[in-house]
Image: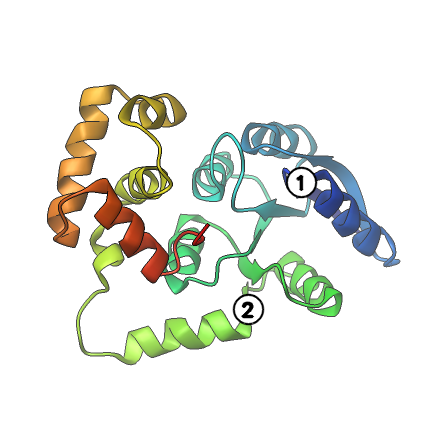
Amino acid sequence: MIRIVVVDDHELVRSGLCRIINGVQEMEVIAHAGTGHEAVHLCRELEPDVLLLDYKLPDIDGLETTQQITALELKTRILILTMYTSEEYATRLLKAGASGFMVKDSPSSELLAAIRKVANKGIYVTPSVMEGMVSRIGEHHGETPEATLSDREMQVLLLLAKGALTREVAKSLSLSMSTVETYRSRILRKLNVRTNADLARFAIKRGLIDNE
């Protein structure tokens, strides 16, 4: 039996995922939640075989959640479920310790296959994203602009690009406002842009955030 914890902040999505998984004989959802902190707690307490984790959560994002759970050195394998198709997200999450990266518009049959593969100590990446990752490896044009950012700089970039103020970013990431401003200056320099509006346009163009 594959024991699974499902974490997604949308209750309808979470319920649908649980229904799909519990409909398979060899799988069982043992708990579900809606935040990254709950995900860390449940993994520490229950040590599931697989954590099905939404990337976009209301408290800490999928990257930080993955890093915290990986640091616990559990047997739990993490499968990221997200609407983003950016190879940059997939690359960072796999480096952080995730075992899979899957986009939300995939069919349920693919979801179940991904869970099985991850549970059996394999790595699963949605084929279209994997193709992009392989293509990037074969390119000889150097790193993409966003690849030059550290994980923390990427988190700051995404929040600023979504319109968060410095104090809001500081609170969200438990940083001082001066530290956030330092990160912002580094990001602007690395991406060769000047304003937060430029950051938003960059993030949308690179598929890092939605064009809402």
The kind of secondary structure element at disc 2 is loop
Residue at 75% x, 69% y: name it.
Answer: 109
Dividing the picture into quadrants, the one containing residue 100 is bottom right
Dividing the picture into quadrants, the one containing residue 132 is bottom left
Pointer 2 or 1: first along the chain: 1
Q: Is residue 26 above or below residue 178?
A: below
Query: Disc 2 versus disc 1: distance between alpha carbons?
Result: 22 Å
Residue at 38% x, 41% y: name it.
Answer: 162
Q: Residues within 10 Å of mark 2 (few under 14, many from 20)?
A: some
64 and 168: which one is in front? Answer: 168
User: Image check: 184 left or right of 74?
Assistant: left
The residue carrying mark 2 is: 126
Residue at 50% x, 29% y: name it.
Answer: 59
Q: Residue 13: x percent and y percent?
A: 71, 47
Q: Residue 127: x percent and y percent?
A: 53, 74
212 and 111: which one is in front? Answer: 212
User: Image check: 24 left or right of 182?
Assistant: right
Residue at 64% x, 34% y: name it.
Answer: 34
Q: Residues within 10 Å of mark 1 (few under 14, many from 20)?
A: few
The residue carrying mark 1 is: 10
Q: Is residue 76 above or below residue 170?
A: below
Mark 1 is on which residue type?
Answer: His
Mark 2 is on which residue type?
Answer: Thr
Q: Are marks 2 and 1 in contact (CB under 8 Å)?
A: no
Colour scheme of the rendered structure: rainbow
User: Image check: 107 left or right of 53?
Assistant: right
User: Image check: 63 left or right of 121?
Assistant: left
Q: Residue 81: x percent and y percent?
A: 58, 54
